[in-house]
Image (tube, rainbow, N blue to C red):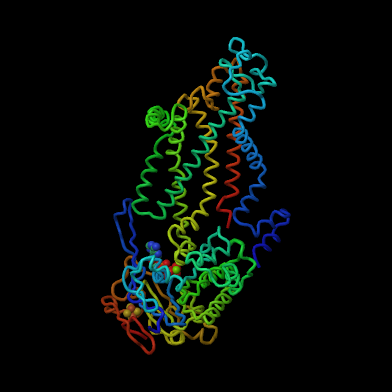
């Protein structure tokens, strides 16, 4: 007698779906739960679509015979795009940037590459650091635990945005002086660095407390009793139980970083022209919004759609992976 | 080579507890405070006592999952007390543990096959006939469907999970198994099946058992000898029949009087002893005999001097006034 029969006989409403729950790995169960969540699936589709078009930016702009550097000055009159809604036409589906005269679709597509890269690199880095430090602090403990804990508390006491504004210029100069990267490259490095430094402590704390509770579970003791090494216990016993947490944190933090990049660039402390990011376009658009509302509405709409769908996907993933419901 | 597979003498395990914010006010919990016990080859020894008396700690310290504070642990004539984890590793194949909680003792993210095969991976051995065949054989041996090798723990009932834990423990053919309340988390109807499985495995593989339990009827059924613990110390050691027929230590008497006897005439006529008061804290145990705060026979000497182990009949008793 196993859970198979229990589950399938208990519920008739989930024809197929409930039967599927048995004989599945915890990962497959989470996937089945996620698939049933329509909102999360649509959000995942939207998010994937935007990542895909960012990745394919050169191909898409190539199809329209536009790029993000050419100035289409013949499309402007007195610095304003000619035609309706910011100069929307077959050749320039999102219209033309007022002032400089670049193609808005190309700006946003290339801009999304920078925005997504910053968000994804930051998320992966801070989750990685949080995992390594959280496991070390909880499993090795002792002085290491208290040192990492103090550093985390110290960092958590700073407001990230304020620190960013204060640190970005000197840090960027430092990165350039060290020859790591130049100009916008250096600014991107600094943005990832600062966001990571102030993000890992929160996740570290969650991992640490999760490992502290996992460590007391008898399966960890059972592995020790079998003679498992420390590294085997960390990688084979603890880590598989931490992946869901890592995925949840990764996905729920992505929209925040996209928004953070936009805000920092908007404030003039992030990436700067001639590169374009969503934040830079929004910044520029804010000074034209009365004469050219489409120029503001299109990037703002895109940011809202992407951030919202990533948030909804994060919620869906959290529901699907929630460790409390996977007994 | 001795007749005993395990000889534990004067085993102590103290836990340092740091209280306060900066870990200043330290105090010491004497969870195990001078325990002697032996397990002969092929024997089953039951370890009983109230909750919190240190049974689990004894089991885990013997397996060196906890570092002993003092005393000695001799396994098959080899003194393992000071062994490092590295030096323990080959011995771990020979001494295994069965855990109390079938829910927390199996990693929810591993398949049953991975769980049972873990010891082969850890000790880098390939059993004859291959890992998969062997694991399926083990599952069958403990009464599970060998086809379920790719299932996950959440798909099994508590009793089935306990069987998985047993299969894991016997995979490397150990000589000694320490079972920490192996059936106390299970339904009564399933307890007997698991106890019988342990019995069968013992004769089949020539196992020696140290079985921790607080359910005396389980202990009576399965043990050859019984060790009674109270507050980190051994109160009485006796052969099972002798202990249940004529307990010599007041604490043992009290424990036994709480067990219902199926015969109603005896049940009605016998004297019942109800212990008053709570188990004292192992951080601050009473002086002299640790049982003196709850013993109805306690005299001044019980409060001033620790009773030595003495032989009464076939039993060993730590009491100034054994029955
Ligand atoms: N890791 C630990 N740190 C601190 N104190 C501990 C630890 N493990 C056990 N103790 C304490 O040691 C004493 C004995 O605990 P132990 O778990 O060995 O008792 P037990 O006889 O197995 O009880 P139970 O029947 O409840 O399982 C208890 O007072 C307990 O609080
Ligand atoms: S030594 Fe004294 S207090 Fe302890 S059990 Fe014996 S009679 Fe009771
Ligand atoms: Mg216990």
Residue B217, position in %: x, y?
51, 79
Is residue B278 visible to the viewer in this orientation of the structure?
no
Is residue B11 toward the left or the right of residue A279 in the image? left
Is B178 located above or below residue A22 in the figure? below
Residue B135 position by quadrant: bottom right
In percent of the image, x 41 and y 53: which residue is there? A138
Q: Is B145 in front, or is B230?
A: B145
In percent of the image, x 36 and y 84: which residue is there? B316
Residue B149, position in %: x, y?
61, 65
Is residue A275 toward the left or the right of residue A30 in the image? left
Is A42 located above or below residue A98 in the figure? below
Residue B101, position in %: x, y?
51, 66
Residue B298, position in %: x, y?
32, 79
Residue B281 position by quadrant: bottom left
In percent of the image, x 66 and y 40: which residue is there? A42
Q: Is B125 in front, or is B60?
A: B125
Image quadrant containing the N terminus of chain B: bottom left
């Amino acid at each position: 007698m196993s859970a198979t029969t229990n589950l399938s006989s208990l519920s008739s409403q989930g024809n197929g779906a409930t039967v599927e729950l048995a004989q599945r790995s915890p990962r497959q169960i989470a996937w089945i739960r996620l698939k049933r969540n329509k909102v999360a699936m649509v959000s995942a589709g939207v998010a994937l679509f935007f990542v895909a078009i960012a990745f394919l930016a050169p191909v898409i702009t190539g199809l329209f015979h536009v790029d993000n550097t050419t100035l289409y000055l013949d499309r402007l009159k007195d610095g304003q795009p000619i035609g309706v809604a910011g100069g929307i036409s077959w050749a320039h589906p999102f219209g033309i940037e007022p002032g400089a005269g670049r193609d808005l679709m190309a700006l946003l597509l290339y801009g999304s590459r920078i925005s997504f890269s910053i968000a994804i690199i930051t998320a992966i880095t801070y989750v990685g650091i949080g995992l390594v430090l959280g496991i070390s602090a909880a499993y090795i403990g002792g002085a290491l635990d208290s040192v990492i804990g103090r550093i985390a508390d110290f960092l958590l006491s700073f407001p990230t945005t304020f620190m960013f504004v204060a640190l970005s210029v000197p840090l960027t100069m430092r990165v350039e002086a060290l020859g790591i990267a130049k100009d916008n490259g250096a600014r991107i490095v600094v943005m990832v660095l600062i966001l990571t430094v102030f993000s890992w402590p929160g996740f570290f704390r969650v991992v640490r407390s999760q490992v502290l509770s996992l460590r007391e579970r008898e399966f960890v003791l059972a592995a020790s009793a079998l003679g498992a090494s420390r590294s085997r216990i960390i990688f084979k016993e603890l880590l598989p139980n931490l992946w869901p947490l890592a995925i949840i944190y990764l996905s729920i933090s992505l929209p925040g970083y996209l928004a953070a990049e936009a805000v920092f660039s908007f404030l003039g402390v992030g990436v700067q022209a001639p590169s374009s990011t969503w934040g830079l376009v929004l910044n520029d658009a804010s000074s034209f919004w009365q004469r050219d509302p489409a120029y503001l509405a299109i990037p703002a709409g895109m940011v809202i759609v992407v951030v919202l769908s990533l948030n909804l996907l994060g919620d869906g993933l959290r529901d699907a992976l929630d460790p409390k419901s996977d007994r | 080579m001795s007749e005993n597979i395990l000889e534990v003498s004067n085993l102590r395990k103290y836990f340092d507890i740091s209280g306060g914010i900066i870990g200043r006010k330290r105090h010491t919990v004497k969870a195990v405070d001078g325990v002697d016990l032996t397990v002969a080859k092929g024997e089953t020894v039951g370890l009983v006592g109230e909750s919190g008396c240190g049974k689990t700690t004894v089991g885990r310290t013997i397996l060196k999952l906890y570092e002993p504070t003092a005393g000695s642990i001799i396994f098959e004539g080899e003194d393992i007390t000071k062994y490092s984890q590295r030096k323990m590793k080959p011995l771990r194949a020979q001494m295994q543990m069965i855990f109390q909680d079938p829910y927390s003792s199996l990693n929810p993210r591993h398949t049953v096959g991975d769980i049972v095969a873990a010891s082969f991976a850890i000790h880098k051995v390939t059993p004859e006939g291959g890992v998969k065949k062997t694991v399926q054989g083990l599952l069958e041996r403990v009464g599970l469907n060998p086809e379920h090798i790719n299932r996950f723990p959440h798909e099994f009932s508590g009793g089935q999970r306990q069987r998985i834990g047993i299969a894991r423990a016997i995979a490397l053919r150990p000589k000694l198994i320490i079972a920490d309340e192996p059936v106390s988390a299970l339904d009564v109807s399933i307890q007997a099946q698991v106890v019988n499985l342990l019995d069968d495995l013992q004769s089949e593989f020539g196992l020696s058992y140290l079985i921790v339990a607080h359910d005396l009827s389980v202990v009576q059924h399965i043990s050859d000898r019984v060790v009674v613990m109270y507050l980190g110390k051994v109160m009485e050691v006796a052969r099972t029949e002798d202990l249940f027929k004529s307990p010599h230590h007041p604490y043992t008497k009290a424990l036994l009087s709480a067990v219902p006897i199926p015969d109603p005439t005896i049940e009605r006529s016998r004297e019942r002893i109800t212990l008053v008061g709570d188990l004292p804290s192992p951080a601050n145990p009473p002086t002299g005999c640790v049982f003196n705060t709850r013993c109805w026979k306690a005299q001044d000497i019980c409060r001033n001097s620790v009773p030595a182990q003495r032989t009464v009949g076939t039993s060993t008793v730590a009491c100034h006034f054994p029955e």
